[in-house]
Image: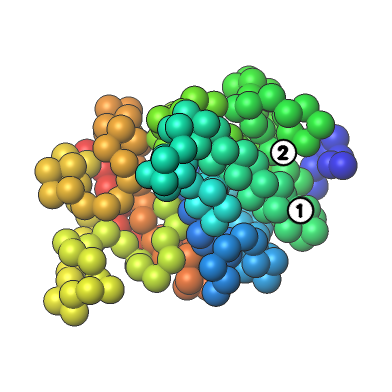
Amino acid sequence: MTSSTSPETPSDPSQTRYKRVMLKISGEALMGDQGFGLHPPTVKRIAEEVKTVHDMGVEICMVIGGGNIFRGLSGAAQGMERTTADYMGMLATVMNALGMQAALEGLGVFTRVISAIRMDEVAEPYIRRRAVRHLEKKRVCIFAAGTGNPYFTTDTAATLRANEMACEAIFMGKNGVDGVYDKDPALHDDAERYDEISYDEVLAKRLKVMDASAIALARDNNLPLIVFSLDEPGGFRGILAGEGTYTKVQG
């Protein structure tokens, strides 16, 4: 159970580049070297990264995918009806959100898991004004169950919630890659990283950053996307302090 009060902000948010951000990570980021599920040391490491940014006074929203447990598209590809498969994937994101909540609160960070599908015993229902109030009270808001609708990815859910919460940027934490490249750096030694690229270029070049609907939603609302590596300790905090390696997608 979480407390109704939050600790005082330990630092001045005016010293950071952004005051309120969305952090989007994949479910696979939570499974470490395992092939499935949650790897507690990895979840704790990511929670510690989030705490360092929270300690700067930044208001943080999070969306976590569910691919480490179940992915709707994969289920549909194996013959399962797509809508059912997508709802199963949404439930997987709730499990990941609860795991991250436990890790953050173990570090003394107050959180709320907010679900687009009602499950009052484990999460709050999504009410925008209530979620904004949680952020103002310096609680980390973890948005779960996607948009609550099938056929939409957690990328789209993250972009939607970021707009609704008036976030100033979406931070997309990647495993094994520190930005957007012109080709897959795992397969091509001559792959080049972009320091900055427009949303239209991402769509035209079919770069695998987010799905097309999420990119269009971010572009139409002038919401910048910061793509960085989750593997680099202090990377999330460093970018907010004006340092680090990343790609900025905007315009």
Decide if residue 48 is on the left or right side of residue 218.
right
Q: Could you say where residue 111 lies in the image, as x and y percent from the top left?
A: 72, 43
In the picture, the disc for residue 86 is none
Q: Is residue 245 above or below residue 210?
A: below
Callout 1 secondary element:
helix
- Where residue 6 sits, quadrant-wise, is top right
> Which residue is labeled 2 in the image?
112
Earlier along the polypeptide chain: callout 2 or callout 1? Answer: 1
Q: Could you say where residue 34 lies in the image, as x and y percent from the top left?
A: 57, 71
Please name the residue shown 14% across and 76% down the image: 190
Task: Tell me which amino acid carries mark 1.
Answer: Ala
Please name the residue shown 76% across and 53% down the image: 102
Please name the residue shown 42% across and 40% down the image: 79
User: Which color mode does the image show?
Assistant: rainbow
Q: Is residue 187 above or below residue 200?
A: below
Asked whether residue 56 is in view, the answer is no
Q: Could you say where residue 23 lies in the image, as x and y percent from the top left?
A: 50, 48
Q: Is residue 44 above or below residue 12?
A: below
Q: Residues within 10 Å of mark 2 (few under 14, many from 20)?
A: many
Q: CA distance from mark 2 to mark 1?
A: 10 Å
Q: Nearer the viewer, residue 95 or 219?
A: 95
> Which residue is labeled 1 in the image?
102
Q: Quadrant of the N terminus?
A: top right
Q: How many marks?
A: 2
- Where residue 212 sits, quadrant-wise, is top left
Q: Residues within 10 Å of mark 1 (few under 14, many from 20)?
A: some
Q: Quadrant of the C terminus?
A: top left
Please name the residue shown 22% across and 74% down the image: 187
Q: Nearer the viewer, residue 182 or 61?
A: 182
